[in-house]
């Protein structure tokens, strides 16, 4: 990237002389010279970390040691929107984009069923929803009383991004505007003329200066700036402004009507002619005057009649009776503008775009479509060139030249990935050529189209920021070729240690039916939590993922931790995690045994010695189920019977019948045979535990036989 960092005008890092117009970033690091080393590293987003280091062998008198790190934000110089406003636009445009994609897919599905449908209405709804996000609300308070000397009304603060969007809407999306494109450009210039130049004079800036001067002018008609402002406003079609300024003329004052009637009549006649100007448009704009005509024949008749009235007034003898020279010259200049005098229009306008609009208003009012508009724009640029080319100008020339590639390149270069990703829907709505160009699969792009490429670029921009990554899937899922693969990578890169981030990722998977990715994310989360000591969270996420293999391994580890004797102390240590486990074998794996053992422990704690209660019977049933269950390890049999001695030695009557007692005796016999194997593990029970259990079982067997 061509550029350098500098402090107080001195270059710290030299750059090659071959680099033309390098971008210079001035950094205030606050360290005293000399600077020995400089380190540059990427930060998040479009920021760099620049580290300044001082020499190690400093004098003892020097207090500053080490260095300093400064964050430098790289930008294109466009400060129209700050980061928070850009995020607001990004989030606000997600919903219109997603809704439009669903509508378009539905219409395409219906068109395959031999329905010839047009989605221009949906495109305009989408365009209006997005356009509403791109402006600034007016900060100036609105006055209840209208000041007659207020020439320009303060409205929404214009932005270049919204101006560019409206141009694309006018020429591509809004098919109804094609019949009156010149009038659409008049309205567009009225809203965005203030953006065309910050260093040169425009009609808007001229009127702003005039409005500030009106407060100090007693006789406005004596000031040349007053007549220049009216002629400039009229030349670009701001008819209401021209009429309002005309009626500030001193001849309208009551105390002067007696000796200035002719002068006042001429001013009023010109004001009426301006307000009655025929307009080839369906309806007037918010600041428009004139008479609207929707059909060309009606407009031509009205236009010829209106021009006849102007010519008649031009030849009138009343001009001789007008004693005020500035008024006479100013009004006749206004008539020349309305008659389409080229010299008057060039003198009244400030740049080629204003001259371009004035040509459509007064010289070529019957222009329809793009035919000849590009040639006229070139002529106007030669007549009224701009010293500093505004970034909107390249977009306008691309549109007028009907070159989609230039339009796309200008949108990308001047307005960034957001603009291209969303504006493609407008470009393809009004042009078959654009649709073929942008939707064609290209081998040099890996088989994807230009449309998908720009969506992927914008999604990558969103994914690089922690506050916008969650809306990137909306754009990735609209990319049929590579979107799902990149979305999978994006989801796997999100940190699983934060539950909110994990839940957000799982919600995205649920919305787009990515079940396999959702399962893998839960497995990753389970493994992470287990390895970092959060055992309960680890087991929970592995259960949600249905990971039988890892749950079984965890069960084996849990058996080792609890111990062979399953003592009360060791069991309490893990009882909390056992509470989290499901009782179903398929989801809990080998941990089913501990879950059932927990139930047995709770039942034994509730049993009171000598009283035959339902709890005691339930404890016996739990014991028998555990001894019969194949999931119960052999090393736990003796511990289970030892913990259940109170059930075997029940005073009132035997709780175990003959078959149940024989089952336990057979288990003891199997344990006796297992002692002969070298891999047998002794339990931590007292030495007399085995004899005590045998005696209790024998006693219970005898009592059970007698009872039966």
Image (spheres, rainbow, N blue to C red):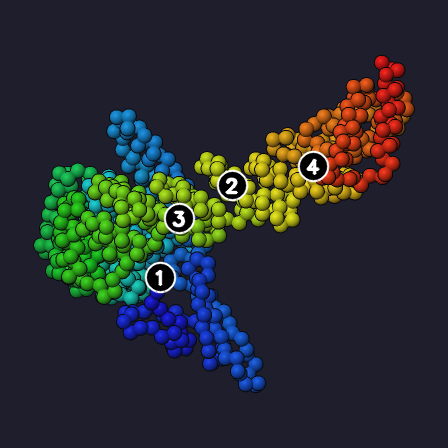
Q: Which residue ends up furthest to the top in the rendered image?
A: 708
Apparent side of residue 357 relative to residue 589 in the rendered image (left or right): left
Q: Earlier in the sequence, mark 1 or mark 4?
A: 1
Nearest the eye: 635 or 436: 635
Describe the element under mark 2 as helix, strand or loop. helix
The mark lying in front, picked from 1 and 3, is 3
Apparent side of residue 464 relative to residue 612 in the rendered image (left or right): left
Q: Which mark is residue 76?
A: 1
The mark lying in front, picked from 2 and 3, is 2
Q: Residue at x 43, y 44 (%)?
A: 487
Label 1, label 4: how far apart the Cα atoms are: 58 Å
Camera sees residue 611: no
Badge 4 density bin: few <14, some 14–19, many ≥20, Cα 10 Å: few
The mark lying in front, picked from 3 and 4, is 4
Q: Earlier in the sequence, mark 1 or mark 3?
A: 1
The mark lying in front, picked from 2 and 1, is 2
Describe the element under mark 4 as helix, strand or loop. helix
Badge 1 density bin: few <14, some 14–19, many ≥20, Cα 10 Å: few
Identify residue for label 3. Answer: 459
């Amino acid at each position: 990237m061509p550029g350098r960092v500098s402090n107080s005008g001195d270059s710290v890092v030299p750059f090659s002389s071959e680099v033309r117009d390098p971008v210079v970033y001035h950094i205030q690091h606050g360290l005293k010279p000399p600077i020995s080393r400089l380190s540059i590293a990427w930060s998040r987003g479009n920021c760099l970390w620049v580290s300044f280091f001082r020499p190690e062998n400093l004098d003892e008198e020097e207090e500053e040691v080490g260095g300093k790190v400064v964050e430098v934000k790289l930008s294109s110089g466009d400060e129209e929107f700050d980061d928070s406003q850009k995020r607001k636009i990004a989030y606000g445009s997600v919903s219109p984009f997603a809704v439009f994609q669903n509508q378009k897919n539905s219409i395409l599905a219906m068109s395959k069923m031999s329905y010839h449908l047009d989605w221009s209405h949906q495109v305009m709804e989408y365009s209006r929803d997005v356009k509403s996000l791109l402006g600034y609300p007016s900060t100036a308070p609105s006055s209840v009383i209208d000041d007659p000397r207020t020439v320009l009304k303060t409205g929404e603060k214009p932005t270049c991004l919204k101006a560019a969007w409206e141009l694309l809407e006018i020429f591509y999306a809004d098919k109804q505007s094609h019949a009156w494109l010149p009038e659409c450009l008049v309205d567009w210039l009225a809203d965005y003329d203030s953006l065309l130049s910050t260093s040169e004079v425009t009609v808007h800036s001229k009127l702003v200066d005039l409005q500030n001067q009106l407060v100090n002018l007693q006789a406005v008609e004596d000031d040349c700036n007053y007549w220049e402002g009216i002629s400039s406003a009229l030349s670009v079609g701001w008819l209401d402004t021209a009429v309002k300024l005309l009626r500030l003329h001193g001849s309208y004052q009551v105390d002067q009507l007696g000796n200035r009637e002719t002068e006042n009549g001429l001013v009023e006649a010109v004001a009426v002619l301006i307000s009655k100007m025929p307009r080839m448009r369906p309806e007037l704009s918010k600041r428009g005057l004139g008479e609207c005509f929707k059909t060309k024949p009606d407009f031509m008749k009205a236009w010829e009649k209106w021009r006849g009235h102007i010519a008649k007034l031009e030849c009138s003898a009343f001009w001789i009776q007008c004693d005020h020279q500035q008024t006479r010259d100013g009004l006749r200049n206004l008539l020349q503008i309305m008659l389409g005098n080229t010299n008057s229009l060039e003198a009244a306008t400030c740049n080629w775009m204003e001259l371009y609009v004035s040509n459509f208003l007064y010289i070529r009012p019957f222009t329809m479509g793009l035919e000849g508009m590009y040639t006229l724009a070139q002529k106007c640029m030669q007549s009224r060139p701009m010293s500093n080319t505004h970034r909107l100008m390249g977009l306008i020339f691309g549109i007028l030249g009907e070159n989609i590639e230039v339009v796309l390149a200008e949108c990308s270069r001047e307005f960034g990935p957001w603009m291209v990703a969303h504006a493609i829907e407008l470009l393809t709505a009004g042009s078959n050529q654009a649709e073929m160009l942008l939707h064609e699969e290209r081998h040099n792009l890996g088989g994807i189209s230009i449309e998908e490429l720009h969506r992927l670029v914008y999604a990558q921009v969103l994914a690089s920021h922690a506050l916008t990554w969650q809306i990137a899937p909306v754009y990735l899922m609209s990319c049929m070729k590579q979107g799902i693969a990149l979305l999978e990578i994006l989801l796997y890169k999100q940190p699983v240690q934060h539950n909110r981030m994990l839940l957000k990722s799982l919600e995205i998977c649920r919305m787009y039916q990515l079940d396999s990715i959702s399962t893998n994310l839960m497995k990753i989360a389970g493994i992470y939590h287990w390895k970092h000591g959060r055992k309960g969270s680890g087991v929970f996420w592995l259960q949600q993922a249905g990971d039988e293999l890892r749950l079984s391994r965890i069960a084996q580890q849990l058996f080792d931790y609890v111990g062979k004797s399953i003592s009360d102390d060791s069991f309490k240590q893990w009882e909390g995690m056992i509470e989290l486990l499901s009782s179903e074998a398929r989801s809990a794996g080998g941990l089913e045994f501990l879950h059932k053992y927990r139930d047995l422990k709770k039942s034994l704690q509730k049993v009171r010695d000598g009283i035959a209660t339902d709890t005691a019977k339930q404890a016996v049933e739990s014991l028998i189920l555990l001894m019969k269950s194949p999931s119960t390890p052999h090393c736990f049999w003796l511990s289970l019977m030892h913990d259940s001695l109170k059930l075997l030695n029940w005073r009132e009557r035997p709780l175990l019948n003959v078959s149940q007692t024989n089952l336990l005796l057979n288990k003891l016999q199997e344990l006796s045979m297992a002692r002969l194997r070298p891999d047998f593990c002794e339990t931590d029970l007292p030495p007399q535990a085995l004899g005590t259990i045998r005696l209790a079982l024998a006693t219970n067997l005898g009592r059970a036989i007698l009872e039966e």
